Image (tube, rainbow, N blue to C red):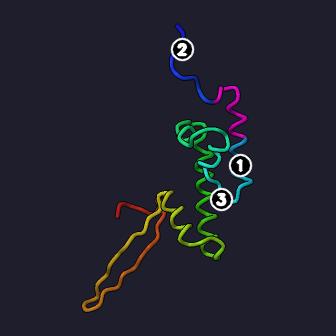
Amino acid sequence: MAKVGRPPLVPEVDMPLLLEKFERYIQETEIPIIAEFAYQNGFGKQYFQDREEFSFLIKKAIAKKEAALERGALIGAINPAMAIFSLKQLGWRDKQQVEHDGNSGVMTIVFASPEDDHGD
């Protein structure tokens, strides 16, 4: 029986080369952007997100990006608004808590990563 459907974008024999290229991109890029790597290699980022063999590298790229954005914003090397925007694209969010002590209210804004959200 003949195979039906669209052939894969990357033949299985070439997959190790693409994985190595993605690893090198992560290592050599200060703030890795999955969509940028995908574009540079003629794919949509969804292709990488749909393939199990890329899951570890995607997590590695996101971890490096989060760290670089947070550090850059803290030391003033990156525009804080852009860092916040980018981190929100990765699932971070502003979490507002309001505490009242009788007559005055105190509002605390906490910036939390997706891992920090415990269903509050």
Q: Secondary structure at mark 3?
A: loop
Pointer 2 or 3: first along the chain = 2
The type of residue carrying mark 3 is Ile
Circle 1 is placed at which residue position? 25
The type of residue carrying mark 1 is Tyr
Tag of residue 31: 3
Q: Is residue 54 above or below residue 95?
A: above
* Residue extent of the magenta highlight: 10-20
* Residue beneath the point at 70% across and 26% down: 13
Circle 2 is placed at which residue position? 3
| Between 119 and 61, the one nearer to me in the picture | 61
Outermost residue, left side: 102
Find the distance from the CA under tag 1 to the CA under tag 2.
34 Å
Question: Is residue 9 found inside the magenta-colored segment of the image?
Answer: no
Q: Residue 40: x percent and y percent?
A: 67, 44
The answer to whether residue 120 is left or right of residue 16 is left
Magenta stretch, main secondary structure class: helix
Outermost residue, top side: 1
